[in-house]
Amino acid sequence: DADLLFVGEAPGAQEDEQGEPFVGRSGDVLDSALRDAGLSRADVRITNCVRCRPPDNRNPRTAELANCRGHLEREIELVDPALLVTLGKVPAEHLLERDVAVTSEAGDVVDCEVGDAVWPVLLSVHPAATLYDRSQEETFTEAIAAAAAYAGDGGQSRLGEF
Ligand code: URA
């Protein structure tokens, strides 16, 4: 029962160990951006496109994404969020089924058909991108702030501010 559903790529090593998404360094970045936006983990739901850790941290393969697609669609349907937020290129391209330039498209909200319904999806860079490239920090925190404003408003009225 969350207004915001964040969709990452796949569990990393720590996530795999603990059975929770985004509990490693990327999770710290996400938590801090949520806090800055006045939210906590308890206010949102966080998931991944695939449920198992791809070996050697490689990107999930098309067949692996397809394998987990039913779980993701069911989760979206059950949570019924006001907004989906993709974290990084893999979930954005998986849901939108097109190439996505995440840095230039970050903050955009696009309609996306998933299962039998159409959902608004806000595109964001992956939190880990901020660890490798400080210039991505603002892009990331602004996208999370836009998502929080969208959910707080129950709609799109404040998106123009970002
Ligand atoms: N990166 C992801 O995309 N998902 C996680 O759960 C952790 C790191």
Image (cartoon, rainbow, N blue to C red):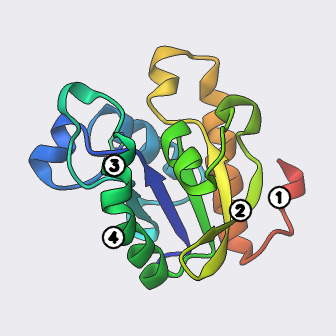
Pointer 2 or 3: first along the chain:
3
Pointer 1 or 4: first along the chain:
4
Crowd rating for badge 1 (residues with CA inside 10 Å; few <14, some 14–19, many 20+): some
Q: Which quadrant of the rendered structure holds the N terminus?
A: bottom left
Report x, y in % for residue 86. 55, 51
* Residue for badge 4: 71
Farthest left residue in view: 17
How far apart are labels 4 and 3 at the CA level?
14 Å
* Residue for badge 1: 159
Left or right, 16 with respect to 130, comes to left
Left or right, 52 with respect to 87, comes to left
Crowd rating for badge 2 (residues with CA inside 10 Å; few <14, some 14–19, many 20+): many
Q: At label 4, which amino acid type do we have?
A: His
Give the foreground label among 1 and 3.
Answer: 3
Which mark, by number, is residue 63?
3
Pointer 2 or 4: first along the chain:
4
* Residue for badge 2: 149
Q: At label 1, which amino acid type do we have?
A: Leu
Residues tagged 1 and 3 counted as in contact (Cβ below 8 A): no
How far apart are labels 1 and 4 at the CA level?
30 Å
Kindly identify the residue that appears in the image at 30 percent across and 59 percent down: 67
Q: At label 2, which amino acid type do we have?
A: Ala
Give the foreground label among 2 and 4.
Answer: 4
Give the foreground label among 4 and 3.
Answer: 3
Report x, y in % for residue 127. 48, 35
Kindly identify the residue that appears in the image at 63 percent across and 75 percent down: 82
How far apart are labels 2 and 3 at the CA level?
35 Å
